[in-house]
Amino acid sequence: MVFPDPLPLVPFPVSVQRLDGTLPLPATARIAGDDALTALLRDDLAARTGLVLGTAGTASAGDIEVHIDSAVSHDEGYALTVTDRIRIVGHDAAGAYFGTRTLLQLVQADGDAWSVPRLEIEDAPRFAYRGVMLDVARHFFDVDAVKRWIDRASDLKANTLHLHLTDDQGWRLHIDAWPLLTERGAATSALGDPGGFYTKDDIREIVTHAARRHMIVVPEIDLPGHTHAIGLAYPELVEPPVMNDALRADAERLGQPLPVAGEPYLGWGVGHSSVRIGDERVYEFVADVLDETAALFPGPYLHIGGDECLGTDPADFAAFIARATRIAADTGKTPVAWHEAGAVADVAPGTVGQYWGALDPSEAHAADAAHFVAREGALILSPSDAAYLDMKPSADFPLGLTWAGVVDLHRAYGWDPATVVDGIDDSAILGVEAPLWTETVRTPEDADRLAFPRAAAIAEIAWSSPDGPEREWASFRDRVARLAPAWKTAGIRFTPIEEIA
Ligand code: TNX
């Protein structure tokens, strides 16, 4: 078996030293290391190759061993060597886990057998936050679909799942103190499709599944806009739908229905809804919802939305964001908000901003984003004209939107987080996230078709340094194409493109 150069690794590691020859991986190979480190590797290797490997106390020639040694540098870093055996050494458990992801990409069919190229790899991520987002509000995705989404992202070394849990079209998280939210506000999705919601046990199952794969889950409760669904349950908490001339014209242009108070909203116009910012009862609601949400998700972040409040007076918006980010911080979490919240002078210190403007930001967007950093926060970069998985990958693609442009694979790959917002470099960037909004995404298959292969481009941008090896388009295109067999085996219904069939 001759392994190609470059090896089919995405994201590409910090350093790869090829050694001569290959190591066969026979069914008799065993895996050594403690169970927490090896159990998933065993399952995932079986799914990839059909080989169900046994375990061993210590590894001999031909075996795989996985352990932790803090001498390997960098959080989530690992070393992987393939000599007379395969050895993965993580700086920490996450590093060992990400090393196993690399091994899964290295394993190649050799006729009926499997083998791995001999080599030495050292690797660690560029950014601490490497995320994907799933909008489960515009269309609901059940627990199994969310788990498969986690598996897909994790194989690309993402460590964060952002769940957009609430929006005009549905409220998807059961809240004990406000039970009507899911009883009345979760029945439908965009386009009139069925809705759904997660019980607290469902969320525990998702969070546990993610944690096994060293991934945290960031819950988003979108406030003060994107809140039409709250009004189906608690009409006293929301304003009547705003319908000024601009919003009406927008709805008409997009062929979207106008929202009607108390009726489910099945379109995807934005900017027409808001909670009652001047009403104290709303802040009791926000505190209850954020407390219960924070208690359910063990990760350090709590996202409070803040986007597209197009019908809200800026002073009201500022008053709300100042309070809501503090209520979020009072839960013990770090608040996260979309970049519009950066326009608020008094946003809670330490709030993380999520930038969704263009690669070439308007002055206002850049200033909003920079303000989080000036307030001791940091930035997550999700530039919509490069990182949005719901933008169409080609103009005639049946799914997706185009408001930020057509984003093909080349465009998704061709940007650097450190050059988006002037003055914001790696020291202020927490990481990178690829959101999948689901207005047009009705099934997990639709999600795959939009996300793959572009999710691989964003994953490499989040993990691999721009001056690292193979970090250029021609190499990426070759490597991502060679992931196709593994994606097929995993049931990923990626969109075949010229480069990947
Ligand atoms: C903008 S980006 C939104 C979402 C839409 C998305 C569709 C952002 C923070 N808000 O409400 O779903 O565009 O691409």
Image (spheres, rainbow, N blue to C red):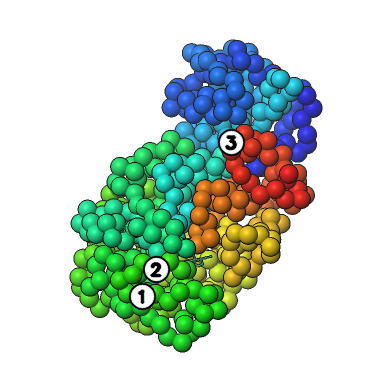
376 left or right, relative to 74:
left
The residue identified by callout 2 is: 265
Looking at the image, residue 117 lies above or below residue 426: above
User: Where's residue 146, x and y in %?
Assistant: 45, 45
Q: Where, quadrant-wise, is the C terminus in this rendering?
A: top right
Measure the alpha-carbon separation of dots 2 and 3.
35 Å
Task: Report the front residue among 127 and 170.
Answer: 170
The answer to whether mark 1 is within 8 Å of ligand 1 is no
The residue identified by callout 1 is: 260
Q: Residue at x 47, y 25 (%)?
A: 39
Mark 1 element type: loop
Measure the alpha-carbon separation of dots 1 and 3.
43 Å
Task: Report the front residue among 128 and 323.
Answer: 323
Q: Where, quadrant-wise, is the N terminus in this rendering?
A: top right
Task: Report the front residue among 442 and 344.
Answer: 442
Q: Residue at x 60, y 12 (%)?
A: 28
378 left or right, relative to 126:
left
User: Where's residue 31, x and y in %?
Assistant: 54, 19
Q: Verify CB contact (< 8 Å) between mark 1 and mark 2.
A: yes
Mark 3 element type: loop
Disc 1 marks which amino acid?
A: Val
The residue identified by callout 3 is: 490
Mark 2 element type: loop
